[in-house]
Image (spheres, rainbow, N blue to C red):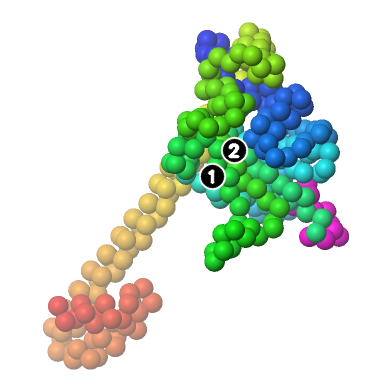
Amino acid sequence: MPHDNGKFYGFTEDRVFGWVMEDKEFCKFILQTILPDLKIQKIEELRLQEELNSAGLLTKDVRLDVLVTDEQGRVYNIEMQNANEHNLGKRMRYYLSAIDQHNTLRKGATYNELKEAYVIFLCDFDYTGQGRLLSSFHTYDDHDRAYILPTGAHFIIISDKGNRHGQSQDLQNLAKLMNGEKITGNKHFDYAQEKIAAINQDPQRRAQIMLYETRLLEREQYGEAKGRKAGMRAGEAEGRKAGRLEATLADIRKNIAGYRSFGISDEKILERLIADYGSDVDPKQIKAMMEE
């Protein structure tokens, strides 16, 4: 068991987020808070840390934090993001493609059967730089932005660093929960805060979180080491290539001087050098060397 570091793990920690969101009633409440225009009656299916593998394909697998389906078949992917890698748009696009492939359109089905899909990222940073608590994105017509292409896809970013003014109390409370601020007077957030406190007091849960963090760190360090090693190999190969080229150019210079000492014409020398070295050195470079 890992040594306890005494750290308090809040709602934005990956494992804590999953354990809190696994309660269907709370998950439905959060979705309804973010999407107040929807009338979500029931969560039919809720999956945590769902890995969507592309078997037999040379494509990147996707691990989704929370994947939800409601009673109308609408699909929701809820992700917690703590680090701004400046690629949220493309990440959301890739997640949606994986969701469509694995969860909403089966073989033999028509495109009309694609379900409404909502990709929701809860961010511990202001990704858009606009200071908004909630930002939603759709595909608009360039000439008439009142027209939205009916793809059935919805992309939503919640930033706990955004301006809370004018937002619903529940949405403000969600930002507070992400920031670790105290919330009172709401049974759903009471549940979340009590759950987070219980997780932090449970030695086994804390050990799971620390083990999870250790494995993430190890993978990150392994990736960095692998990248450095690959870079070193590439650098060494490039260095050897540069060294061989320099040696070849030195040979050409020696041959130019030697051929000329025997009174051979430059035309004949160039012809001979291109025949000997043309596969390794650009003939134009050889000609330029003779004119130096």
105 is within the stretch colored magenta: yes
Amino acid type of the residue that numbered disc 2 sits on in the rendered structure? Phe
For residue 235, above or below residue 129: below
Total label count? 2
The mark found on residue 121 in the picture is 2
Q: Nearer the viewer, residue 3 or 114?
A: 114
Pointers 1 and 2 in contact (C-beta within 8 Å): yes
The mark found on residue 281 in the picture is none
For residue 229, above or below residue 124: below
Of the 4 image quadrants, the one containing the C terminus is bottom left
Q: Residue at the front extreme?
A: 166
Q: Position of residue 160 (x, y in %)?
A: 52, 30
Of the 4 image quadrants, the one containing the N terminus is top right
For residue 106, above or below residue 11: below
5 is within the stretch colored magenta: no
Q: Position of residue 25 (x, y in %)?
A: 76, 25
Start and end of the magenta stretch? 101-111
Amino acid type of the residue that numbered disc 1 sits on in the rendered structure? Leu
Instruction: Give the residue at x 20% y 74%.
Output: 253
Q: Residue at the right extreme?
A: 108
